Amino acid sequence: MPIDDKKPMPVDGARLIQDVVAELGWDADAASVAEGVRRLDIGLPAEDEFSVVCAWLGKCQLMHKLDQQQVPVASKQEYQVPDLIARFSTQANQSPILIEVKSKKANVLSFTPDYLKRLQNYADLMAMPLLVAWKFHSVWMLFEVRHMTKAKTNFNITLSSAMRENLLGVLAGDVAYRFGVGVGLHLRFRKDKLVNTVQTEDGSTEQWMMTIDDVVFTDRDGNRRKDVDGEVQSLITAWNLESQEEHTDTHIHLRFVAGKEGIQFAHKALVQLLGWESPSDDRLHWRGFLRREQITANVKSFSAALEAAFREKFVSHIFNQQPETMPDFLLPR
């Protein structure tokens, strides 16, 4: 791996090198160490993504990974260190919580009895609640481990049960929302000069020099708006808008409009926003986002932007999900 001396080492670069050397040994060749550092810098996508999501949603006061290099080695037979420890401003208690992170595309999440017992032993030892963060395709859920029930052998939780007991909203600040029908972005391109015409079997293709001479947003009441806050604009463009195109003799009109269908979770909007801001189509580098003071460049506070979008008549609904079973650490005392 070539070294770019113009690119500064990440703030946690020394720790990455230390972890790789500890695993490979001091006699490992430089190429192996460099590749190991690169892989660690890419990170564990599920853990890093969940950490970025919680940081962005605005209710997380502290979250970090737990070092799972246990000693003595025999302790691994009794204890399993979870992935993360966290504290949220929404908690009614003072104790942090422990979170085990999983990414599974099956509609049932399963833990072996031994694995679950070792996780719970650690949580009991620390006297902390134990939660599971589950990424199902692109959707995150967060629930207490006690909702996993024993099947024939393993302890399972179904997708529907995890959704019903989801704490990501009440604990971390996640919401679901919907834009009003007709909300959208409208661009008008003026045809300045015909550059070229190519004849085809179906007619012809024209190449024009054009100028954007009008940009306007529409709200859910159909009003044309140009006084739209920048963060609200970002939320609109991150929505799954339907494209429409109209040609006249003098202009081309491009319209990107919200339809009747669709509900978006805040944590999924984050992925959309980061996708817009990323310089390429490569997968998102979640570990890199963890180092940022402000995760998204265009939306500093998602909750404030969403409230503004509702107040300004762009968002039509905001849904705050409550779990079926409210945990003790969220109950007011």
Image (cartoon, rainbow, N blue to C red):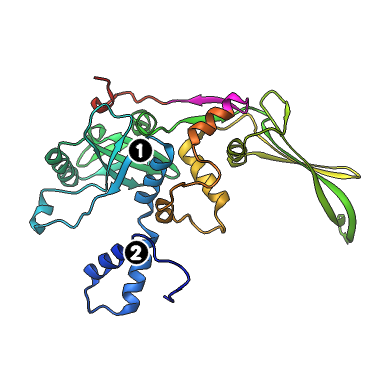
Start and end of the magenta stretch?
A: 310-320
159 sits to left or right of 97: right
Q: What amino acid is labelled 1 in the image?
A: Cys
Label placed on residue 60: 1
177 sits to left or right of 147: right
Viewer can see residue 150: no
Label placed on residue 212: none
Label 1 – label 2 distance at C-alpha: 25 Å
Q: Quadrant of residue 185?
A: top right
In the image, residue 271 lies at what x, y percent?
Answer: 50, 46
In the image, residue 274 lies at what x, y percent?
Answer: 52, 49
The foreground one among 17 and 53 is 17
In the image, residue 73 lies at what x, y percent?
Answer: 10, 59
Mark 2 neighbour density, 10 Å: few (under 14) some (14–19) many (20 or more) = some
**What residue is pinned by disc 2?**
13
Q: Is 262 inside the magenta-drawn segment?
A: no
Q: Marks 2 and 1: in contact by CB < 8 Å?
A: no
Vertical side of 194 occupied by 165: above or below = above
Q: What amino acid is labelled 2 in the image?
A: Gly
Mark 1 neighbour density, 10 Å: few (under 14) some (14–19) many (20 or more) = many
Q: For the residue labelled by badge 1, is the local secondary structure a helix, a strand or a loop?
A: strand
112 sits to left or right of 207: left
Vertical side of 75 occupied by 261: above or below = above
